[in-house]
Amino acid sequence: MKTLFKNARVVLENRIEEDYSLLIENDHILAYGPNTFFIDNYDLIIDVKNQFISPGFIDLHVHGGGGADFMDHNNEKFKIITQAHAKHGMTACLATTLSSLNEEVFELLEKCPKEDENLEGARILGVHLEGPYFSMEQRGAQDPMYIKTPQVEEVNEFLKYKHQIKRWSMAVELENMDKIIPIIKQNNILVSLAHTSATAQEVIKSEDWGVSLATHFYSGMGSIYRIKGLRAAGAVEGVYLSKSMIAEIIADGKHLPKELIQMIYKFLGAKRVILTTDAMRAAGTDHMESILGSLEKGQRVIIKDWVAKLPDETSLAGSIATMDRLLKTVLDAGISMVDGVNSISLLPAKLIHVDDRYGKIEPNYKADFVIFDDDINIISTYINGKCVYHNA
Ligand SMILES: [Zn+2]
């Protein structure tokens, strides 16, 4: 079955083309080009009415949405989460854990659907382990009960699931990390700096061991601080000074204000920034209250000002961002559409080595794409060539 999407503004890797058409066949992209290249002789023709078509949005760090969390570990919940986010343009993600009992993490690793299994919502490309090797003082909303000192033997236990683990976030200054990080890297897993008390120098050193990403940059890490009155550079500065580390940002305009988003893009350049929701279960709902983490043992939070906060509003306690809002926020900060779209599609795909089939509008790529208007209101989301969401 061939479907033609005509009259679109198509967002390509390095430009936007107007009055273009996209032709897909079943689950993959066949061609794109000027409207005039295509004769109207296909099974289905959809007039996109001059809206944008971009590659589907890929989130390497999402905990939940639609009222469910990946740590609830069941297929019904996985569907709820991935469908809730597909409405906001997400076509693929990494199911993300929290520091918790190892058995609970293993359960998610065992039950997590494969890439082509769960196609009514965003695909699950694997699991992102967020924890348990974190700095106690930078733990944020991670449960201190489960944060621990890294041990090679335990890492090897996790690595029994190496085919499901695509990313692992950890504090790089902890003991044994010089041995542990290279072992994880050898297993083709993306290692990311997170919830860390590392100094700038420790971050720079960790790049040589294989750390290539900073998890929710600025959150859960230190910036300029003082030792006996003298200024010292922290993890944030280490990322800025690293050779090529990429910053993952929660670009919801709350975790990071517009000025910091502008500074990050300006200093690192658009090829070193990716966007994430880091969303908890209340994302994509109108809930005023929610639970961060597991339903039984998690933390009660309130939803206000587009974020989750502790009930006394003293601290942020999680994100309820959706992909469409991240893109809108970076565009409002002056980032171009091409750069914004790359940081939410192609660059995350590259980091986990799936950019041979996802992250671009390109012949032979999977037909995972999004149609949206100038205000980034999602009109339709397509996964595997099938419309999984349409805002009529
Ligand atoms: Zn997270």
Image (spheres, rainbow, N blue to C red):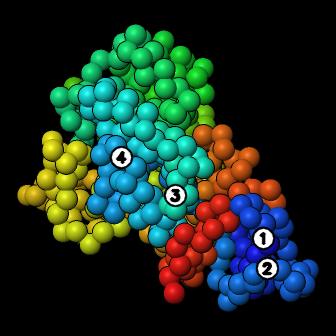
Q: Residues within 10 Å of mark 3 (few under 14, many from 20)?
A: many
Q: Amino acid at mark 3?
A: Ala
Residue linked to disc 1: 1
Residue linked to disc 2: 43
Query: Mark 1 vs mark 4: which is more N-terminal?
Result: 1
Residue linked to disc 3: 122
Tell me the SS state at disc 3.
loop
Query: Mark 2 vs mark 1: which is more N-terminal?
Result: 1
Q: Are marks 2 and 1 in contact (CB under 8 Å)?
A: yes
Q: Is residue 233 visible?
A: no
Q: Amino acid at mark 1?
A: Met
Left or right of 159, for residue 96: left
Query: Mark 3 vs mark 4: which is more N-terminal?
Result: 4
Q: Where, by quadrant of the figure, is residue 32 drawn? A: bottom right
Tell me the SS state at disc 1.
loop
Q: Residues within 10 Å of mark 2 (few under 14, many from 20)?
A: few
Query: Mark 2 vs mark 4: which is more N-terminal?
Result: 2
46 shown above or below 55: below
Left or right of 58, for residue 308: left
Question: Where does the N terminus fall, quadrant-wise?
Answer: bottom right
1 or 3: mark nearer the eye: 1
Residue at image location 64% in from the left, 83% down from the top: 51
Q: Which mark is residue 160?
A: none
Mark 3–mark 2 distance (CA, rounded to whole Å)? 25 Å
x and y percentages locating residue 252 in the rendered image: 39, 63
Mark 2–mark 1 distance (CA, rounded to whole Å)? 6 Å
Query: Mark 3 vs mark 2: which is more N-terminal?
Result: 2
Mark 1–mark 3 distance (CA, rounded to whole Å)? 22 Å
Query: Mark 1 vs mark 3: which is more N-terminal?
Result: 1
Decide which of 6, 14 is in the foreground and name it: 6
Residue linked to disc 4: 74
